[in-house]
Image: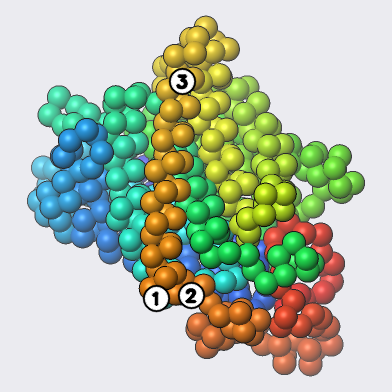
Amino acid sequence: MDTGDTAWILTSASLVLLMTPGLALFYGGMVRAKTVLNMMMMSFGSMGLIGVLWILYGYSVAFGDDLGGGLLGNPFQYFGLNGLIGDGNLSGTLPVTAFVGFQAVFAIITVALISGAIADRAKFGAWMVFAAVWATVVYFPAAHWVFAFSSDTYVGGWIANNLKAIDYAGGTAVHINAGAAGLALALVLGKRKGFARDPMRPHNLPLVMLGAGILWFGWFGFNAGSAVTSGNSAAVVWVNTFGATAAAMLGWLLTEKIRDGHATSLGAASGAVAGLVAITPACGALNPVGALIVGAIAGVLCALAVGLKYKLGYDDSLDVVGVHLVGGLWGTVAVGFFATDKAPNGVSGLFFGGGVDQLWRQCVGAVAMLVFSFVLTWIIGTVIQKTMGFRIDEEDEVAGIDQVEHAESAYDWGTLTAGGGRVVGSPSRPTDARHASGNSEVSL
């Protein structure tokens, strides 16, 4: 056991855990005031539920002995982490339990990411049922595919070991997976009342920016922690993650400025997240200049992609598809173009003399994850919708999910109005992210 590596992985796990409350703030600020608690509760609910399932059988499904074809680990091998807490149990230079904790927080945030696609219209109880089933049949196997590397005594997942696609920290298993799932659920639940008709505004942009800042901070644990050691690889990944995120924010803001005539705070926050998403699979394969290029392109692509929901007619409330699916696809495929053998992954892409060998592997891995996640999510969501009901009633959507589902309100409106503030809008006026807003007003 290396104490330095152990300290780094435990610190990284804690950083990644903080990302889920950061995501709750990021998403919470983008919805209407009467649904912010429900939005945040879907993230916090994931922390509790997936944490329990991971200890019971999730880790075993993801990292247990392969049951055949690189598709699934043995769910009973480490049930309840049986046999893993003794002093002699190591994963490389780490105690196995340190690795268990690090991977647990990846599972949590992947599930939480999906919730943004169905904001404003999902029952909390149905969401919790969905989260449990989806994690069991989609994420835990996907983690085995991507993160379970084979050794002399262990057979891991097919994407990592047979296909040999590079996904340093979860572009496929986390972001493409969550983005495809978000698209499927958005189609199952249907459009919000007033979608593409009413002005839909984020209710609290400072919350959005705070959430994005926490995500950026925690993402260093997400990516650099995936080096699993505290050496040069982690340092290179840290720098690549930082550079790509900064470039993506600038790319998004420039796109806004050219297209709309102004750069927004919401655009800055969204651009940073888009860069973080795109660099996640590629952070160990690029040099710093390559990371800047990948990040800048991600900012432009994702800024343009968020408008697809209006053209194609699906209601992805908080742009999980536009940011996580598109950003994850771009970052995964970009490895095939910009990878250099001087980086920790040690492979070369098309632009560094490697031909198309790595490129086709990246494309196959990305498409396989997209199809797998979309199809299974659509089935799970449809079954829940037709049995217990996934979407809230229209009158409850109008009244506000926070009161209906949780018997709470995020804000004391009486105090706000008594202090001379101005509350505008009505309960029948939904809001949405990334629509120009008057920041001096509180949108209900």
Do callouts 2 and 3 mark residues in contact (Cβ within 8 Å)?
no
Residue sitting at x 44%, y 41%? 371
Q: Give me the C-alpha separation between circle 2 and circle 3.
A: 40 Å
Do callouts 2 and 1 mark residues in contact (Cβ within 8 Å)?
yes
Dot 2 falls on a residue whose secondary structure is loop
Q: Which residue is mark 2?
A: 123
Residue 140 visible in the displayed image: yes
Q: Tell which circle, 2 or 1, labels the residue nearer the N-terminal end.
A: 2
Q: Tell which circle, 1 or 3, labels the residue nearer the N-terminal end.
A: 3
In the rendered image, the vertical position of residue 376 relative to residue 44, given as above or below: above
**Residue 360 image label:** 3
Q: Residue furthest top?
A: 353
In the rendered image, the vertical position of residue 116 relative to residue 416, given as above or below: above
In the rendered image, residue 423, in percent from the top left (x then y), is placed at 80, 83
Answer few, some or many: residues within 10 Å of disc 1's Cα (few below 14, many 20 plus, some between 14 and 19).
few
Q: Amino acid at mark 3?
A: Trp
Residue 218 visible in the displayed image: no
Q: Amino acid at mark 1?
A: Met
Q: Closer to us: mark 1 or mark 3? A: 1
Q: Give me the C-alpha separation between circle 1 and circle 3.
A: 42 Å
Q: Give me the C-alpha separation between circle 2 and circle 1.
A: 10 Å
In the image, 253 versus 162, the foreground residue is: 162
In the image, 335 versus 1, the foreground residue is: 335
In the rendered image, residue 321, in percent from the top left (x then y), is placed at 58, 48
Dot 3 falls on a residue whose secondary structure is helix
In the image, 200 versus 51, the foreground residue is: 200
Residue sitting at x 84%, y 67%? 438
Q: Amino acid at mark 2?
A: Lys
Answer few, some or many: residues within 10 Å of disc 3's Cα (few below 14, many 20 plus, some between 14 and 19).
some
Q: Tell which circle, 2 or 3, labels the residue nearer the N-terminal end.
A: 2
Q: Quadrant of residue 403?
A: bottom right
Q: Which residue is mark 1?
A: 388
